[in-house]
Image (spheres, rainbow, N blue to C red):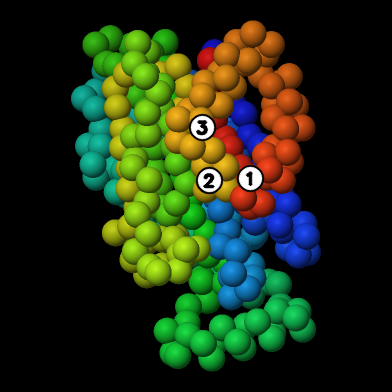
Amino acid sequence: MLNPIQVSVIGSDHLAYGRPLQDFAKAVSTKDFAICSVADGHGADKHFRSATGSMLASNIAVDELEKFGMEFVKSMRQGKDKLDLPETIENLERRIICRWKESVKNHFHQNPLTEEEKVLYEQRMISSQGEFSLESIYGTTLIAGICIPHQIIIGPQKPFWLVLQIGDGLCFVKEQNKEIYCPIPEEKKESPFLNYTKSISSSNAKQDFKHVYGFSNIEYLCVCTDGLSNSFSTDGLKEFITDINSNVKAFGVQKEQKELEKYFPTITRKGVGDDLSLAGIFR
């Protein structure tokens, strides 16, 4: 059985400065597969609707991965060869980007700027020197994954998992009989500004998307925003996620979900003060 967990808490610094929660996490499971997703809205004032941007990105990614999962399972059950995965995954990424950009445009037109937002919008227009894009005020990162376990695949086909990522944050995979690892290396900053990261709002979003997939049974797959990854060492975070999996097995997913919701505010207070989000698929 695949157990989804999703947790998002507002950062202690955000509370102190009156900023909203700009992260979003979502995890779902069906009888055939499970999906997890996190998105981290950019925190600068110029991205003043990033909370909405992250919510839209995470929900759209889950929706598109559900469609992908249903198509994949149908193909395997019919005994067909594997999908053309490189092309299928590229199309998946393209649909997520296009749907997100269309959704933020619709949100902008359906929700007029407040007086406070008008000031920020005008400042953004001036500072961008003609390179402004509407999508940037909703800017966000995104990490999402899907796991299709071996019980679903009939015949010679193997189980399958996939992770997509644009921007910072980390994903972790624990395959059976292997150590937990990060299949997508941590993003290297390409700007002198510490808070710079790649974004789904960028005109280069398609080129900036990364993905990795495998045909192996996994014990768990977990994604988190940089607020959480920056609150631990890499080894410390691996241990933390391993403990989550152990607790799910020992006490059940609902109890562990509640414990994480209680504990995350302590992590942000003692850590970097940023929003924290984690979404995962555990057995």
Element on which disc 2 rests:
loop
Q: Residue at x 47, y 46 (%)?
A: 169
Amino acid identity at mark 3: Leu
- Earlier-in-chain disc, 2 versus 3: 2
The residue closer to the viewer here, 189 or 109, is 189
| Disc 2: which residue | 230
- Earlier-in-chain disc, 2 versus 1: 2
Q: CA distance from mark 3 to mark 1?
A: 13 Å
| Disc 3: which residue | 237
- Indicate the position of residue 39 as horizontal and vertical percent values: 54, 50
Q: CA distance from mark 2 to mark 3?
A: 9 Å
In the rendered structure, are the residues bearing label 2 and label 3 in contact, judged by CB atoms less than 8 Å apart? no
Amino acid identity at mark 1: Gly
Q: Is residue 221 above or below residue 151?
A: below
Image quadrant where residue 185 sits: top left
The residue closer to the viewer here, 82 or 245, is 245
- Earlier-in-chain disc, 3 versus 1: 3
Amino acid identity at mark 2: Asn
